[in-house]
Image (cartoon, rainbow, N blue to C red):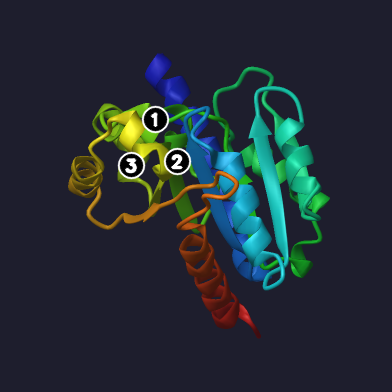
């Protein structure tokens, strides 16, 4: 019975994901799903990236959290259109949740939609939201064993961001071994190394340039 229930949940989710994907395609919106553990630095990375992209693209953000709108307020302070989803204890966002809040945006006025998922490396990995690109953010402070312990998250990632690289030495993580593990699990993953701490920002510009390039490429192919 449990398997039947799980299959039903995933079938419903995948149907909504397909609807979302078609809507994004019709609107020419490039969509990114960002996931990672609590404390990986997802929101700080997003803030830094948005600052670099906002003069080139029209951007919307969906913030997913168990509770509070703290991260949404941080994004709104940059001048970005943002919608908050609180899951009330749920460990992930699903495609239906995304579908329900899309009317909160002027879809035809967006180039890029970024979804910051709930902090978790397990549940979010299983749910397609209709995104074009999936990013996993991993802090070096989490330890190099995370790709092997949570392979599904890394297996389905298009981009892996190794964040807080400024404290790599103090963390004791073997960066090269971790990168080898990521590429062994997912040879197609593109890896960026970043730091978002004030005065030590690095790698974010390269990530932003890559995301702008992908967004404009989709827009070019969907224009009438």
Task: Give whichever of 17, 48 is nearer the camera.
Answer: 48
Q: Residues within 10 Å of mark 3 (few under 14, many from 20)?
A: many
Q: Position of residue 178 (x, y in %)?
A: 24, 40
Task: Give whichever of 198, 176 is nearer the camera.
Answer: 198
Q: Look at the numbered disc 1 and give the secondary structure of its residue.
A: helix
Identify the residue at horizontal 39%, vertical 52% (top origin): 193
Residue wearing tag 2: 164
Residue closest to the far top = 1
Q: CA distance from mark 3 to mark 2?
A: 18 Å
Asked if the residue under mark 1 is in contact with the one under mark 2, i.e. CB atoms within 8 Å, the reply is: yes
Residue wearing tag 1: 141
Q: Position of residue 48 (x, y in %)?
A: 61, 53
**164 to 90, vertically: above or below:** below
Q: Earlier in the sequence, mark 3 or mark 2?
A: 3
**186 to 121, vertically: above or below:** below
Identify the residue at horizontal 68%, vertical 70% (top origin): 57
- Residue 4 lies in what quarter of the image? top left
Residue wearing tag 3: 154
Is 88 positioned to the left or the right of 187 in the image?
right
Q: Look at the numbered disc 2 and give the secondary structure of its residue.
A: loop
Asked if the residue under mark 3 is in contact with the one under mark 1, i.e. CB atoms within 8 Å, the reply is: no
Q: Look at the numbered disc 3 and give the secondary structure of its residue.
A: helix
Is 143 positioned to the left or the right of 124 in the image?
left
* Foreground tag (1 vs 3): 1
Is 36 positioned to the left or the right of 19 in the image?
left
């Amino acid at each position: 019975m449990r398997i039947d229930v799980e299959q039903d949940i995933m079938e419903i989710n995948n149907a909504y994901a397909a609807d979302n994907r078609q809507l994004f395609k019709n609107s020419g919106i490039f969509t990114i799903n960002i996931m990672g553990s609590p404390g990986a630095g997802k929101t700080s990375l997003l803030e830094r990236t948005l600052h670099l992209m906002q003069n080139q693209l029209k951007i919307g953000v969906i913030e997913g959290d168990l509770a509070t709108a703290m991260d949404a307020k941080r994004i709104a302070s940059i001048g970005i259109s943002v919608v908050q989803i609180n899951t009330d204890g749920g460990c992930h966002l699903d495609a239906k949740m995304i579908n329900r809040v899309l009317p909160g945006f002027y879809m035809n006025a967006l180039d890029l939609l970024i979804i910051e998922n709930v902090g978790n490396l397990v549940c979010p990995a299983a749910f397609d939201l209709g995104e074009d690109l999936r990013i996993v953010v991993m802090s070096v402070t989490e330890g190099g064993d995370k790709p092997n312990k949570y392979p599904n998250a890394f297996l389905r990632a298009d981009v892996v961001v190794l964040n807080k690289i400024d404290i790599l030495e103090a963390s004791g993580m073997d960066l090269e071994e971790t990168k080898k593990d990521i590429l062994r699990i997912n040879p197609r993953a593109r890896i960026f190394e970043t730091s978002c701490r004030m005065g030590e920002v690095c790698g974010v510009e390269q990530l932003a340039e890559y995301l702008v390039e992908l967004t404009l490429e989709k827009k070019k192919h969907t224009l009438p």
